[in-house]
Amino acid sequence: MAGQSAGKIQILLFAGLREQAGWAEKQWAVAADPGAAVTPRGLWLHLQLPGELDQGVRVAINQQFADPDTPLQPGDELAFLPPISGG
Amino acid sequence: MSSLFYPRSAEAEAKTMQLRIDLHDDCFEPLHVLERWQAELRHGGIADSAAESLFIGRVRDTTTDGTPLEALELEYYPGMTEQQLERLALNCCNHHGVSHCLVQHRIGRVLPGEAIVLVAIGADRRGPAQRCCQELLEALKHDAPFWKREWRADGTGTWLTGNTPL
């Protein structure tokens, strides 16, 4: 993920979570917070996303399920996934 | 329609397995798709399985609260959904030692009665075929990023936050 997203984390929301939050996609500049590791949980709290991260909402980093406390790297694609209902 | 297709020997994990996964943004007829896939395999010299198990899921005509359903909307995560379906299918098929796996899933607006999912598994024995089919279906219901929204005739819609009971 080079180019415009380098140095930033791309954050994606889906389905009901996207509609509750009122946005689908944001870029988060990593350099804005150099002193601490940026994690999905930290961004979830900072962005004041609705609901509880551990109550059905799952995290994906670069399109793979991940732990909410995984440190994020510049260029990562982070997605918050509301409860899945496939098939 | 997006597609993942592993012909024989294309992947180390799929060396002895035929795997095909498609996402359909329009109505598909499950048995026709299955028949076409099997004909392609036969044409490529790959014999039919001795045992086959398949599941077809169709959209109900009522919502979870019992009102008439106008349509079901299926959202997905482009890229991750396809990758996750592939991971789930390979894991499940390798675990059960089956030889053929076809997964077809709808996306977008799906009408009552239309097929939403097809899982077809071929194996040498009925046990692995049936167990793999059920296990893979449950895996994709819970671990493949799809989201359903039920639309009613009055124009209101509700995102579902879970699956129907087994």
Image (spheres, rainbow, N blue to C red):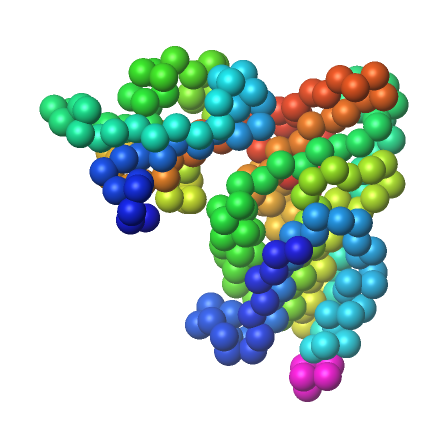
Instruction: Give the tally of numbered discs.
Output: 0
In the rendered image, residue B45 lying in the magenta stretch gets the answer: yes
Position of residue B71 measured from the top left corner of the image (x, y, whole percent):
80, 31
Q: Residue at x 52, y 24 (%)?
A: A18
Question: Residue A10 is drawn in which quadrant?
Answer: top left
Question: Residue A45 is drawn in which quadrant?
Answer: top left
Q: Of residues B25 and B99, which is closer to you in this image?
A: B25
Left or right position of A66 against B78: left
In the rendered image, residue A14 lying in the magenta stretch gets the answer: no
Q: Residue at x 75, y 45 (%)?
A: B116
Looking at the image, is B145 positioned above or below residue B155?
below
Q: Quadrant of the N terminus of chain B?
A: bottom right
Question: Residue B122 is drawn in which quadrant?
Answer: bottom right
Q: Of residues B24 and A52, which is closer to you in this image?
A: B24
Position of residue B130 measured from the top left corner of the image (x, y, whole percent):
71, 57
Position of residue B151 measured from the top left corner of the image (x, y, whole percent):
77, 25
Q: Residue at x 30, y 42 (%)?
A: A4
Q: Residue B163: tell me if it is visible.
A: no
Chain part drawn in magenta: B42-47
